[in-house]
Amino acid sequence: MTTDALALAGRTSEAYAWLILSIGVGQSAGTALAGRLAEQPLTSAVLPAAGAAFALAVLLAARRQLRPAGHQPRG
């Protein structure tokens, strides 16, 4: 679903503004956190493993929404 489909009539610009704001805040927070974590000695091994585990958890939680349209579950 696109932002246009979710926005109320006449509010598309505001919907995109909120989207841009949330992306910018997320990037800023991630950069600040990465800077702090990069100073820690064990981060070089733990950070990529934690990122992979988090990505796997998100994918597993969203697997029903990630199925192709028209896909019939087996069983």
Image (spheres, rainbow, N blue to C red):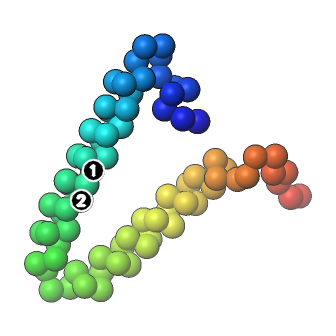
The answer to which image quadrant residue 30 occupies is: bottom left
Classify mark 2: helix, strand or loop: helix
Which residue is at the far top? 9
Residue at horizontal 13 percent and vertical 80 percent from the top: 40
Cα distance, mark 2 to mark 1? 6 Å
Using the image, tell me which numbered label, if any, was put on residue 30: 2
Image position of 35 (left or right of 73): left
Residue 53, relative to residue 8: is it above or below?
below
Residue identified by numbered label 1:
26
42 or 67, nearer to the observer: 67
Classify mark 1: helix, strand or loop: helix
Q: Position of residue 35 (x, y in %)?
A: 14, 69
Residue type at tag 2: Gly
The C terminus lies in which quarter of the figure? bottom right
Kindly check if marks 2 and 1 are in contact, taking CB atoms under 8 A apart as contact: yes
Label 1 environment density (alpha carbons within 10 Å; few <14, some 14–19, many ≥20)? few
Residue type at tag 1: Gly
Q: Position of residue 11 (x, y in %)?
A: 40, 18
Q: Position of residue 68 (x, y in %)?
A: 73, 52
Residue at horizontal 38 percent and vertical 78 percent from the top: 49
Label 2 environment density (alpha carbons within 10 Å; few <14, some 14–19, many ≥20)? few
Using the image, tell me which numbered label, if any, was put on residue 11: none
Residue at horizontal 36 percent and vertical 73 percent from the top: 50
